[in-house]
Image (tube, rainbow, N blue to C red):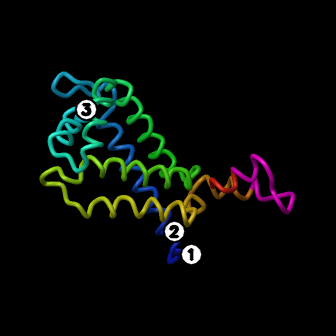
Amino acid sequence: MWHSPSLSLGLLRMMFGLLWLDMALQKAPWVITDGQRFGWLYGWIWTEIKNPTFEFYKNFLHDVVLPNFNTFGYMTFFTEISFGISLLLGLFTVLGGIGGALFQFNIMLGAYSVPGEWYWIWPLLICPHLVFAHSRAGRSLGIDRLLYDRLAQGEAQPTGIRKLLLWLI
């Protein structure tokens, strides 16, 4: 059992969950940096605007995100908390993995051209999330295992909400 690849995958998934929780808490609404809520997020968005990879994304950050910064700050905080909980606990890991990969891709769009950012960090952050989703990593050391065992009992071909839940875990 201690040599099982699923054990390693479960532990890696949990570490990524802790990473998300740490990043969310650095951008929590109560963290004030340079007079702005949400920690270093506001300053980072300006850094991305000053070093654009894509003009459309720079315009989105400048014209949509900054004027609605509080809304986007809360969205970022709660999204990252959700990914952290999902991956740490192994709860709806398919959703957490796909969402985490897409969120990292979104961050990459703005940060790719920022001086000092290592461009290989993005595949190294995106790919594990896809592995977590594809391998259903929450079924190892996670709540998804318990949910799957409970939901898989019964009828041979699950339908409706049960089928959706089985896909998400």
Q: Residue at the location (36% across, 48% down)?
A: 106
Residue ranking furthest to the top: 35
In the image shown, does 24 or 43 lie closer to the viewer? Answer: 43
> In the rendered structure, are the residues bearing label 3 and label 2 in contact, judged by CB atoms less than 8 Å apart?
no
Q: Which residue is mark 3?
A: 62
Q: Which residue is mark 2?
A: 7
Determine whether, in the image, residue 60 is placed left or right of residue 134.
left
> In the rendered structure, are the residues bearing label 1 and label 2 in contact, judged by CB atoms less than 8 Å apart?
yes
Per the model, the C-alpha gap separating discs 1 and 3 is 51 Å
Residue 124 on the magenta segment: no
In the image shown, does 43 or 55 lie closer to the viewer? Answer: 55
> In the rendered structure, are the residues bearing label 1 and label 3 in contact, judged by CB atoms less than 8 Å apart?
no
Q: Taking 5 as reference, is 58 above or below it?
A: above
Q: What amino acid type should be assigned to the residue bearing mark 2?
A: Leu
Residue 66 in which image quadrant = top left
Mark 3 residue element: helix
Place of residue 2 in the rendered image (x, y in percent of width and height, measured from the top left): 51, 74
Place of residue 15 in the rendered image (x, y in percent of width and height, measured from the top left): 40, 56
Q: Which residue is mark 1?
A: 1
Residue ranking furthest to the bottom: 3
Place of residue 87 in the rendered image (x, y in percent of width and height, measured from the top left): 49, 52
**Disc 2 crowd, CA 10 A, few/some/many (<14, 14-19, 20+):** some
Magenta stretch in the rendered image: 150-164
Q: Residue at the location (29% across, 24% down)?
A: 67
Q: What amino acid type should be assigned to the residue bearing mark 1?
A: Met
Residue 30 in which image quadrant = top left
Residue 129 in which image quadrant = bottom left
Mark 1 residue element: loop
